[in-house]
């Protein structure tokens, strides 16, 4: 399942995947670390991502993929997604069958080096399990 929500989308009705008990693969696509233009500041909120994960009752989930749009982002934008919360949730008992977490940075060459260090420090438990892979796509 690919979740790609535009940053301009209204989340008045809470997004939930609570009925997806047999979900094996989940991809969060197009997660933006910053706004496209100065007029779109403040930066987008990705607080919904950990909430969706925490409400997901899928004991057979094997793979989660995060596609991060980093073009134009600054190191100060790295905290747009709460990586510690994502780590803690994915290390929970409800995700005992998790075998792979892929983090794909799209564009963002100016933050590429600091991005991987930042994420690894905040997702240390998943990294220690050896299930996290990183990739960079110039797009």
Image (spheres, rainbow, N blue to C red):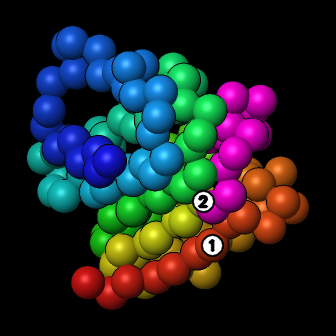
Looking at the image, can residue 58 be seen? yes
Look at the numbered discs 1 and 2 and tell me whether their residues touch, using CB distance below 8 Å: yes
Which residue does the numbered mark 1 point to in the structure image? 133
Residue at x-position 36% and y-position 35%: 45
Percent position of residue 3, x then y: 29, 45
Percent position of residue 21, x then y: 47, 27
Q: Check disc 2: other Cα within 10 Å, few if <14, some if 14-19, many if 20+.
A: many
Apparent side of residue 89 relative to residue 49 in the rendered image (left or right)? right
Secondary structure under tag 1 reads: strand
Which residue does the numbered mark 2 point to in the structure image? 101
How far apart are labels 1 and 2 at the CA level? 6 Å
Apparent side of residue 130 relative to residue 106 in the rendered image (left or right)? right
**Magenta segment: does it hold 22?**
no
Apparent side of residue 24 relative to residue 119 in the rendered image (left or right)? left
Percent position of residue 55, x then y: 51, 20
**Residue most toward the right?**
128
Q: Nearer the viewer, residue 84 or 126?
A: 126
Secondary structure under tag 2 reads: strand
- Residue numbers of the magenta segment: 85-100
Q: Earlier in the sequence, mark 1 or mark 2?
A: 2
Q: Which mark is residue 14?
A: none
Residue at x-position 68% and y-position 37%: 95
Apparent side of residue 110 relative to residue 13 in the rendered image (left or right)? right
Q: Nearer the viewer, residue 131 or 21?
A: 21
Note whether 52 is above or below 67 in the view shown. above
Q: Check disc 1: other Cα within 10 Å, few if <14, some if 14-19, many if 20+.
A: few
């Amino acid at each position: 399942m690919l979740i790609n929500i535009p940053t301009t989308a209204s989340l008045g009705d809470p997004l939930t995947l609570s009925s997806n008990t047999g979900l094996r693969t989940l991809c969060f696509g197009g997660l933006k670390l910053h706004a496209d233009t100065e007029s779109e500041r403040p930066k987008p909120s990705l607080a919904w991502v950990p909430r969706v994960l925490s409400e997901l009752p899928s004991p057979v989930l094997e793979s989660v993929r995060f596609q991060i749009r980093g073009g134009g982002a600054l190191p100060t934008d790295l905290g747009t997604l709460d990586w510690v919360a994502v780590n803690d949730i994915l290390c929970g008992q409800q995700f005992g069958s998790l075998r792979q977490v892929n983090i794909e940075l799209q564009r963002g060459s100016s933050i590429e080096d600091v991005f991987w260090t930042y994420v690894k420090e905040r997702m240390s438990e998943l990294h220690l399990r050896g299930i996290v892979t990183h990739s960079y796509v110039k797009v």
